[in-house]
Amino acid sequence: MSEYLYLLTLLLFFGTIALAFGMKYLAAVRQARSRVLVEDAYRELAEKAVEAQSKNASSLAAIEAEVSQIKTRLASIDEVLRAVE
């Protein structure tokens, strides 16, 4: 009976050590996976920001073109009104 008790004690001791290292490894793997997911989310967010910025730049260019047309029209209207006075 003492042999079984001795082997059980050794098994519990080494099993506990193996379990601790296994849990540490598992935690490292999960942490690495979560980092990858977070980095992917940031990358996706950055891509969306770049797309939005390019859309905003094109919209701004269109608005600037329209404003310049309005300025030229306003200048011509101003000339006409000054000629009428």
Image: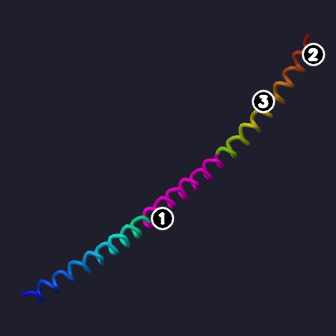
Q: Residue at x 66, y 50 (%)?
A: 54
Question: Which numbered marker is on residue 62?
Answer: none
Q: Residue at x 10, y 87 (%)?
A: 2
Q: Earlier in the sequence, mark 2 or mark 1?
A: 1
Which residue in the rendered view is the most extreme toward the left?
1
Q: Is residue 33 magenta?
A: yes
Is label 2 or label 1 in front?
A: 1
Q: Residues within 10 Å of mark 3 (few under 14, many from 20)?
A: few
Q: Secondary structure at mark 2?
A: helix
Point out the image quarter for the C terminus.
top right
- Contact between labelled residues 1 and 3, with CB atoms less than 8 Å apart: no
Judging depth in this view, the residue of 57 and 15 nearest the camera is 15
Q: Which residue is mark 3?
A: 70
Q: Which residue is mark 2?
A: 83
Q: How is the image coloured?
A: rainbow
Q: Amino acid at mark 3?
A: Ile
Q: Is residue 39 left or right of residue 54?
A: left
Q: CA distance from mark 2 to mark 1?
A: 70 Å
Judging depth in this view, the residue of 31 and 58 nearest the camera is 31
Residue 83, how many percent across, how many down?
Answer: 93, 16
Magenta-highlighted residues = 32-55
